Image (cartoon, rainbow, N blue to C red):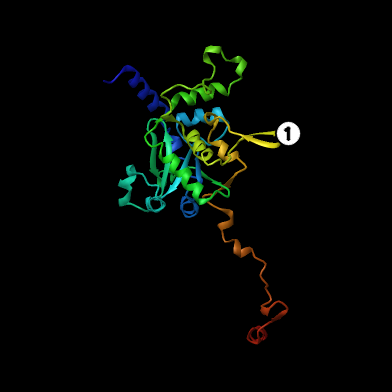
Amino acid sequence: MFSLGQWINNQLTEWLTHESTIAKNTPPLTNFERLCDEIRPGDIILIEGRSRASNIIKQITQSSWTHSALYLGNYHQLNVAGIAPDSMAHYASTPHTDLLIEALLGQGTIITPLSKYRNEHIRICRPRSLTINDRNKVIQHTLTKLGHKYDVRQLFDLARFLLPYSLIPRRWRSSLFNYHAGESTRTICSSMLAEAFMAVRYPILPVVEQTDEGVRFYKRNLKLFTPKDFDYSPYFDIIKYPFVGLDEVAAYRSLPWDEDGYVCNEQGDCTIPIANVESESA
């Protein structure tokens, strides 16, 4: 039976996910074809969203990155690695389509084609030195989250948590550190990905302390992760492919080529060919 609460939630979700016409018409900043050539399974991609929810996240995190997703590779790669779940069987008809896993407001955790973000501003965050075995475990961990709902409450809790704590009425204070039975099937994009990397003990932004035994890493509360943390982390390499790259506009034309006509067999063994000398004298 359709309840009033569900109707209100659907209306709120529709309002939050609405994108303005101006935002939709903004030209992309990323060379999508180059990105597709270079992206690897296990890479995090950051997206600068255009919706009302994205604008809220920008205000909360003070970052333009509002969404994160994990690049899975394609169905063929996942199947060869033995980590393609049965729920992905329908992708077997298009085994080479580039796929992402992401948690979306109003849709939950789903698999989508990379081409969905062709016209968006995207950045790749690549975990440095991650082994193939651990990469597959990270991917497999996220695949277990398929179908989980998006945790809208966590989003608003995060907003409250980032406000000055003393100014928040007690009844409004963040519940980010509280556990409630039955909520394990809800997540947001960055928390889901952080959990997957922590499952193989790969650091993103750990809490680091100097102890008597030396430096010690502590796990960070997964609910506190936001998309910008992958950009800020020293353990992820940042890869950008601008729509017009300055290094792609015939840079070879600026090389300091000799203009006198010398041809060399090797360093120190150069001469001007006779044919060139005769043509110049004529």
Number of disc labels: 1
- Element under disc 1: loop
Q: Which residue is at the front of the view, 33 or 191?
A: 191
Q: Can residue 42 be seen by looking at this rendering? A: no
Q: What residue is shown at x 41% (from left), y 24% (from top)?
A: 182
The amino acid sitting under disc 1 is Asp
Residue 46 spot, x, y in % from top left: 51, 41
Q: Can residue 168 be seen by looking at this rendering? A: yes
Per the image, the residue denoted by label 1 is 212
Q: Quadrant of the N terminus?
A: top left
Q: Which residue is at the front of the view, 180 or 59?
A: 180
On screen, 12 above or below 99?
above
Q: Residue 106 occupies which quadrant of the picture?
A: top left
Residue 189 spot, x, y in % from top left: 47, 35
Q: What residue is shown at x 66% (from left), y 36% (from top)?
A: 216
Residue at far left of view: 1
Residue at far front of view: 213
On screen, 184 above or below 253?
above
Task: Please rate how many residues cluster around mark 1, counting C-alpha atoms within 10 Å: few if below 14, some from 14 to 19, many from 20.
Answer: few
Task: Indicate left or right for 141 with 212 as reference.
Answer: left
Residue 48 spot, x, y in % from top left: 50, 38
Q: What residue is shown at x 57% (from left), y 36% (from top)?
A: 229
Task: Indicate left or right for 105 with 91 as reference.
Answer: right
Q: Quadrant of the C terminus?
A: bottom right
Residue 23 spot, x, y in % from top left: 46, 36
